[in-house]
Amino acid sequence: MPESNRSSSFCLGDAVHRHPPMNGLGSNTCIQDAYNLAWKIAYVLKGQADPSLLGTYSPERQPVGETIITQANASLRTHKPVYEALGSMAPNLEQRKKDFGELSQATPDGVKRRARLQAAIKDIAHEYHGLGLEMNQRYESAAVYLADEGPRPPLPQDHVIEHEITTYPGSRLPHAWLNAKIPRKKFSTIDLSGKGAFCLFTGIGGEKWKDAVIKASEVLGMNIRIYSVGWGQDYEDVYFDWARRREIDEDGCVLVRPDNFVAWRSVGMIPTPEEKLLVVLKTVLRRL
């Protein structure tokens, strides 16, 4: 690594996104930071990426940390109405006992207090059912190739709870159950991706992508895995999950980074797949 980059330092984990334990995403966020940064450092150290790739860490992860902190604090505030409905916020013991006792009373005040408790419990669903908050990370940086994409679709209306399943570049690779031609224990698309290497998913009619991967591997001096998913291909789309979630044609492709985030996709086969894949990888790895 050039001398100018040897003194670079990166902060991750609890050191840079401290927040209350609501939503329980502290460890998740720390691990995601490490996943994002580790492969970039490895590729730079091996000479497979330009050191400027490291500059994509903060633009990708800082917005995620901010989102987690914002929601954790919001979730903390939603607990106050629960405590109030339970009578826990009253100034003295006698009043707290009286307020709590109303929950079991067949009185107008009891009806109101039970309704307040139900509404308060409903509001904290964003803490206990926040799948969207856990999974909807969107990376935007020079390590994501967006030149072939239109505007990104908006997140679901309740993006804290609803998980956006998409292969739009910068998104987490969707899970889909797969199996071998001779059935064995099923496995996920996520089991095939990651593990320190880029990988490319294609399907029937996508044979030229395999040639493109071989060429890119030779030129760039790096391992790139490729999998064809579909009827009679490398792997079977057991429940047609991949067909529903890939958002590309069968002969298109989805290129996945070592951290399981989509780097680029092609909706279908293109005239010069070898040239295009090289351009994409060189762009993502800052090897222009």
Image: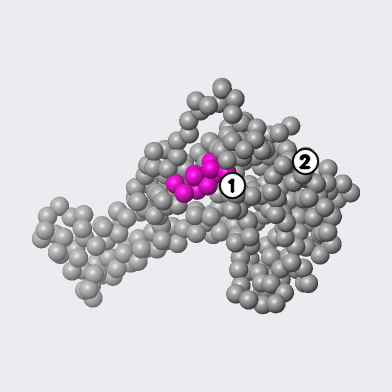
- Where residue 116 appears, x then y in whole percent? 32, 63
Nearer to me, 257 or 125 = 257
- As drawn, the residue found furthest toward the top would be 4
Q: Is residue 37 magenta?
A: yes
- Where residue 91 appears, x then y in whole percent? 15, 52
> Could you say whether the residue bearing mark 1 is in a helix, strand or loop?
loop
Q: What residue sits right under mark 2 in the picture?
A: 219
Q: Report the amino acid beneath label 1.
A: Arg
Q: Residue at x 21, y 68 (%)?
A: 102
Magenta stretch, overall SS: helix
Magenta-highlighted residues: 30-39
Q: Is residue 99 magenta?
A: no
- Where residue 249 appears, x then y in whole percent? 79, 60
Q: Report the amino acid beneath label 2.
A: Val
N-terminal of the pair, mark 2 or mark 1, is 1
Q: Residue at x 71, y 68 (%)?
A: 235
- As drawn, the residue found furthest toward the bottom would be 183
Quadrant of res 251: bottom right
Whether tag 2 and tag 1 are in contact, CB under 8 A, the answer is: no
Q: Residue at x 77, y 72 (%)?
A: 231
Task: Give the CA distance from mark 2 to mark 1.
Answer: 30 Å
Please give the label number shown on residue 138. Answer: 1
Quadrant of res 127: bottom left
- Where residue 80 appears, x then y in whole percent? 30, 53
Q: Is residue 155 visible?
A: no
Left or right? Give the position of 40 relative to 72. Answer: right
> Could you say whether the residue bearing mark 2 is in a helix, strand or loop?
helix
